[in-house]
Amino acid sequence: MERAFWKSILTATLLSIFSPLASADLQPDYEREERLAQEAIAGLFDGEVVYLNDGKRDFLSFLSEPDNSEFDGAILLLHGRGFHPDWPQVTGPLREGLGELGMTTLSIQMPVLAKDAKYYEYLEILDESFPRIEAGINFLRNNDYQWIAVVAHSCSVHMTMGWIKKKGDTPFDAYVGIGMSATDYGQPMLEDFPLSSISVPVLDIFGDDDYPAVIKAAESRNAAILAAGNSKSRQIQLSGPDHFFEDYEDLLIDAVGEWILAASAPE
């Protein structure tokens, strides 16, 4: 009890020190988001442009539905910090690669800040991502996808974990975190992820050349995942990749795709 009290005091203190913009009512950079959206649309070769609404404004997403697929689930894809739904690192390759495996994907635009914004600044806008995650899941449910996996990279892991703390894991059926625990230098995580309370299957996947924060926290993440007790949950460390899986896209696609098929299989 005493430890939890002092941890809450430390969290509040660090936020006040490292988040000087918090009192300025930090908001997402919608102008930058629009530039990213136009860049993504201009480079789109496969998929359908779909605009969803988060309760305040429309936001971009890309829907890809393979023909004659035997996989009847869908994947909600969430990109890394400051990127767009078809970013050429991680999200774009996954969107294409999982589609080639016969999986429907909905890749959505997450809130962004200025290009030089850091982890503690993004903590101030985590709540802005929650309605977008829900809008993506609701869209897939309304289109008759009954099994949904959330696949998040980097900053979107923090966003989804914040959302799960508030909403629980009932809205989705499996979770994939890529490069979990990523932060900026000198900005450690202020709260643990709620991995021990997530009952659906969880895949924690990262490369052995990932950021130090990701690798350092791997053991504690795995302990929390094991404590949750789902027999389909896994932690996978791939040999070679850094945080963005440059030149290791196929390795990531194969690992994520194989795990999703196993997680979605009936007991």
Image: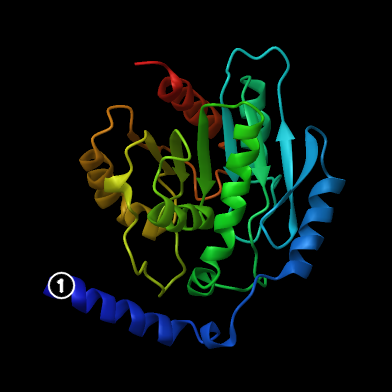
Extreme-left residue of the structure: 2
User: Which percent across, then down, holds residue 9?
Assistant: 27, 81
Q: Where the N terminus falls, by quadrant?
A: bottom left
Q: Residue at x 66, y 42 (%)?
A: 107
Kindly identify which residue carries mark 1: 3
Q: Residue at x 27, y 76 (%)?
A: 8
Q: Residue at x 41, y 73 (%)?
A: 187
Vertical comparison of 92 with 70: above or below: below
Total marks shown come to: 1
Q: Is residue 79 visible?
A: no
User: Which percent across, then down, holds residue 162?
Assistant: 44, 58
Q: Nearer the viewer, residue 98 or 244?
A: 98
User: Which percent across, then down, holds residue 84?
Assistant: 70, 52
Vertical comparison of 163 with 145: above or below: below
| Secondary element at image label 1 | helix
Q: Is residue 212 visible?
A: yes
Could you say which quadrant of the image residue 110 lies in? bottom right
Q: Nearer the viewer, residue 173 or 191?
A: 173
User: Which percent across, then down, holds residue 180?
Assistant: 42, 51
Query: As drawn, is 63 to the left or to the right of 267?
Result: right
Q: Residue at x 59, y 87 (%)?
A: 24
Vertical comparison of 66 with 26: above or below: above
Could you say which quadrant of the image residue 143 lies in? top right
Q: Where the C terminus falls, by quadrant?
A: top left
Query: As drawn, is 163 to the left or to the right of 131?
Result: left
Query: As drawn, is 232 to the left or to the right of 255?
Result: left
